[in-house]
Image (tube, rainbow, N blue to C red):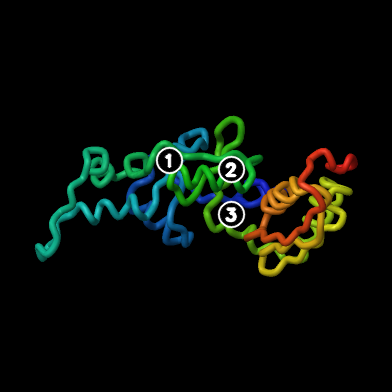
């Protein structure tokens, strides 16, 4: 099976900010490029961090309310330093949480979730910026056509990977939802088939209605 990599999903023409870019220029950079965040790079084009609209808005939220309707929020020392920053390296969230081009969608998504970030700069083996991958980039995988998913499951999973052990299993795909029917010789094959189908790019869910002849693993087909 071919799993789409970060290199296939990422944006390659990356807008970036040098570490000394002033506040107003960063705001203008985001506006001109219709983006909400930008990686901050050093002199060797290595990501140091990411500055986002949320980072920039700290400057506004830390100012006194001219009408006195809301109190000034309490800020930790590091947060106040960012609110008072004037250059990219003072405003950014750091260090940069980065991905590698060869990673799968799953690896990138798990890192985003673990680090609670919306995007990952992508770096090569020398840590230089190669691209950026966002949540929306990863979600594009779920736009795969049903027939492409069907063909991959039928050809790669059932025929080439599992062979005779799954030759009586049939597949239907609708809106990324996979339904498996048919039968197998041994019960233990059912969760294997289901797990492999779930790993196919673009699959939203898998439901199975597969019958089996025996739950004795000694009857496992020798050609599987």
Q: Residue at x 34, y 53 (%)?
A: 54
Quadrant of the drawing holding the C terminus:
top right
Give the number of the mark in front: 2 or 1: 2
Give the number of the mark in front: 2 or 3: 2
Q: Secondary structure at mark 3?
A: helix
Q: CA distance from mark 2 to mark 1?
A: 20 Å
Disc 3: CA contacts within 10 A as few (<14), some (14-19) or many (>=20): many
> Upstream in the sequence, badge 2 or badge 1?
1
* Whether residue 43 is situated above or below residue 179 in the rendered picture: above
Q: Dot 2 corresponds to which residue?
A: 107
User: Is 32 left, or right, of 151 in this rendering?
Assistant: left
Whole-percent x, y for residue 23 in the image: 33, 50
Q: CA distance from mark 1 to mark 3?
A: 21 Å
Q: Dot 3 corresponds to which residue?
A: 138
Q: Dot 1 corresponds to which residue?
A: 49
Disc 1: CA contacts within 10 A as few (<14), some (14-19) or many (>=20): many
User: Is 143 left, or right, of 68 in this rendering?
Assistant: right
């Amino acid at each position: 099976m071919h799993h789409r990599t970060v290199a296939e999903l990422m944006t390659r023409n990356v807008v970036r900010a040098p570490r000394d870019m002033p506040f107003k220029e960063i705001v203008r950079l985001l506006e001109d490029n219709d983006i909400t965040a930008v990686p901050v790079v050093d002199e060797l084009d290595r990501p140091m961090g990411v500055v986002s609209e949320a980072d920039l808005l700290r400057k506004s939220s830390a100012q006194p309310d001219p009408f006195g309707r809301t109190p000034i929020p309490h800020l930790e020392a590091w947060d106040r330093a960012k609110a008072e920053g004037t250059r990219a390296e003072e405003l950014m969230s750091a260090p940069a949480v980065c991905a590698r081009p060869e990673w799968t969608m799953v690896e990138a998504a798990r890192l985003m979730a673990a680090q609670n970030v919306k995007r990952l700069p992508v770096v090569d083996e020398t840590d230089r910026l190669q691209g950026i991958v966002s949540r929306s980039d990863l979600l594009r995988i779920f736009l795969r056509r049903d027939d492409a998913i069907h063909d991959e499951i039928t050809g790669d999973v059932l025929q080439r990977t599992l062979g005779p052990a799954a030759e009586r299993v049939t597949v239907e795909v609708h809106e990324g939802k996979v339904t498996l029917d048919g039968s197998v010789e041994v019960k233990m094959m059912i969760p294997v088939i289901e797990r492999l189908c779930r790993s196919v790019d673009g699959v939203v869910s898998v439901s199975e209605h597969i019958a089996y002849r025996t739950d004795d693993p000694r009857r496992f087909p020798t050609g599987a």
